[in-house]
Image (spheres, rainbow, N blue to C red):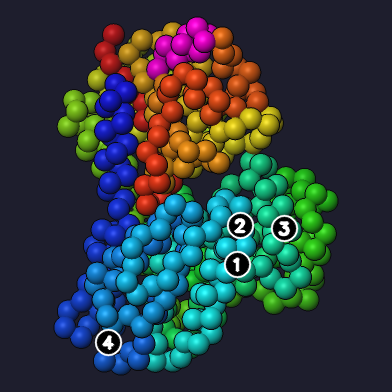
Amino acid sequence: MREAARRVFAAAVASASPRDAVLRHLRLGGETLFAGKRRYALRSIKRIWVTGAGKASAAMAQGVEAVLGKRITGGAITVKYGHAAKLGHVAITEAGHPLPDEQGISGAERIAAILDGAGPGDLVIAAISGGASALLVQPADGISLPEKQETTRLLLASGASIHEINAIRKHLSTLKGGQLARRAAPARVLALLLSDVIGDDLDVIGSGPTAPDASTFGDALGVLDRFHLRDRVPAAVRRRLECGVRGEIAETPKPGDPLFERVQNLVVGSNALAVREAARMARSLGYRPLVLTTSLDGEAREQARMLVAIARESRKTGRPARPPLCLLAGGETVVTLRGDGKGGRNQEFALAAALAARGMAGVCVLAGGTDGNDGPTDAAGAIVTGGSIAKGIALGLSAEKALANNDSYSYFSQTGELLRTGPTGTNVMDLYAAFVLPR
């Protein structure tokens, strides 16, 4: 089952190849560029610039270069450290993620310079993938990088959803929340989006730098209040959001803004495609695939218990489907930090699943991030069975204490159950799989 889990995960990741995703949606026919259902007459375009940010943006830019080659005037993208790829016409900056750093600012300045110089006859192609929210970092006036880092750190530890976190990021930035598109005007903008968010919401992918922003300063402040952070974030952050609520600072561009008439947002890849390929691989390995959802969210440990409960029911009664079965889900859970251990949402999911499946035969659970990085660790997630807790006890470990301290990485490092893939070059959220054998 563990080997089947690895193969199913590998198939899901391979299906989300950023370069291939771009090539499925972008092609050249003579002097016409086809992007989805839209056409661009290249004779009327003076210059083509390639910009963007995200863990997969370099690989996406490879796809753009494969189509347009020397027609590209130049460009700049920012990727997470270790996620660079060879490019011939586009400069790459490697920067920090999930916490932004000075390199991220340098990369954003390169991008901003291109946008500021783009004219009405230009086409700006923006490759945006998961991670862009932290990598496309150009703090708004009055906000310093350390203040933005501290705000990000507090939000990541709060249990806030990616939608809630991005509502704040947009209002502390000069490029997110449709502001990259506003900066590029009057040039035309083609945004290629590799979705890492539930529902593929355009204004949430990478904090929506090329999409209308439905969130407001009031929404951002509401997130701080909901998680009791208003008095904990830096004073400059609190002041900016409060000034925005009073109308003293201009809002991000909203739906209906004429500037978006010259913008095309095209989703080229998503978690749904990865889950579909995972199901195909599971079937080829002899497991009946059952996709539960591609919009799993909520607390990792709670959702893990739910997945194991379904696996137990299947093994006991044959509901909702008979084994051999592969239960599949996609999405992105959250972790509310209570301890000071090391881990990520997928490792926490796996550890909670191991506790829920304790002593069960014929069950194996995988939780993995398709980008190959789970939280601040070198693992994508973990693979556990009903015997994982016994393995830990034999090593003198307490899974309950590890979970209480959010220390899943330390636990799995010793039991040898980490899922390590290295950076995959893509990012379409997470994959969860439970393999169930007949009794």
Separation of disc 4 and disc 2 at Cα? Answer: 36 Å
Residue density around tag 1, few if under 14, some if 14–19, many if 20 or more, within 10 Å: many
In the picture, the disc for residue 100 is 2
* Any part of residue 370 in sight: yes
Mark 4 packing: few (<14 Cα in 10 Å), some, or many (20+)?
Answer: some
Label 2 residue SS: loop
Q: Which amino acid, mark 3?
A: Pro
The amino acid type found where label 1 is placed reads Ile
Q: Residue 87 lies in what quarter of the image?
A: bottom left
Going from N to C along the chain, the mark reached first, 1 or 3, is 1
- Quarter of the image for residue 314 reads top left
> Residue at label 1?
105
The picture places residue 104, in percent across and down from the top left corner, at 57, 63
Magenta residues span 385-395
The secondary structure that dominates the magenta segment is helix
Q: Residue at x 43, y 22 (%)?
A: 416
Q: CA distance from mark 1 to mark 2?
A: 8 Å
On the picture, is 124 further left or further right than 65? right
Mark 1 vs 4, N-terminal side: 4
Res 292 seen here: no
**Residue bearing mark 3:** 146
Q: Amino acid at mark 2?
A: Pro
- Which residue position holds label 4? 42
